[in-house]
Image (spheres, helix red, strand yellow):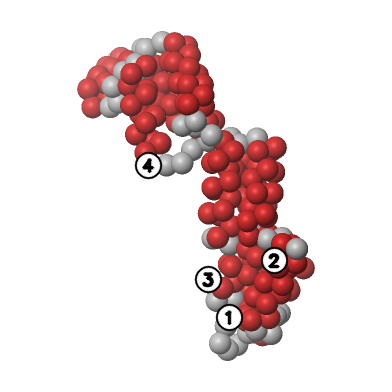
Amino acid sequence: MEEKNRHSRQQKLNKIRQLTGPKPVTPARLENIALHYLERYASSAENLRRVLMRRVQRSAQLHDTDSQAGAEAVDALILRYQSSGLLDDTAYAVGRSVSLHRQGKSTRAIQQTLSVKGVDGDTVGAALEALKEEVGPDLDLRAAVQYARRRRLGPWRREGREDVREKDLAALGRQGFGYDIARHVIEAETPGQLEEELDTAFEESQN
């Protein structure tokens, strides 16, 4: 009896979900979902595929739609967007790398973020090379300086630097920076010393 009641409650719950949840997916609906997503977020091809496939799987669960047909519609949509240039993993990786670097992210963190989004290793490597050409060499040092500046670590602290030295080193370590770079930044005498070092390195790279 209890099992029967549980089954009945589940059927009612499924009906409610069908009425209030996502509508059944069709190729046209998938395209609307994709365009709406791309209007709001930059995306790699694989990341968009995952977004759309979650909708396909949800539709199959709630509405008993054909998940294989949905997957084929997603594949066709991704290919069309790649052909038209609406999806471009190289451009996405370059843009995301620049944005993350400005936030003070290490190359390791950038690689991990892009990998999670489904960008392949070669494309990630090319994006980091493009970033190096734009901002100069020593990407990790530059990012560590940017992060320390934003968080007011090391030479950006007004007082009590020695008391929190280990804490500051650990903060850079959690961002993926190696100990040598973290120590170089945290133990610099002044912010100007680091900024002059980076300016000199950039000028030399342009010659």
Marks 4/3 in contact by CB < 8 Å: the verdict is no
Q: Amino acid at mark 3?
A: Arg
Residue found at the far front of this picture: 207
Residue 31's quadrant in the figure?
A: top left
Determine the CA span between mark 4 and mark 3. Answer: 27 Å
Give the Cα separation between the discs numbered 1 and 3: 9 Å
Q: Is residue 23 above or below residue 37?
A: above
Q: CA distance from mark 4 to mark 1?
A: 35 Å
* Left or right: 121 as drawn, with respect to 101: right
Give the residue number, with chain letter if any, for mark 3.
150
Q: Are marks 2 and 3 in contact (CB under 8 Å)?
A: no
In the image, what residue occupies the spot 33% across and 26% down? Answer: 32
Query: On residue 156, which mark appears?
Result: 1
Query: Dot 4, crowdedness within 10 Å: few (<14), some or many (≥20)?
Result: few
Considering only vertical position in the picture, is 126 above or below 45?
below
Visible in this render: residue 137? yes
Precedes in sequence: disc 4 or disc 1: 4
User: Which residue is identified by label 2?
Assistant: 202
Mark 1 element type? helix
What numbered label is drawn on residue 40?
Answer: 4
Q: Position of residue 184 (x, y in %)?
A: 73, 74
**Amino acid type, callout 1:** Trp
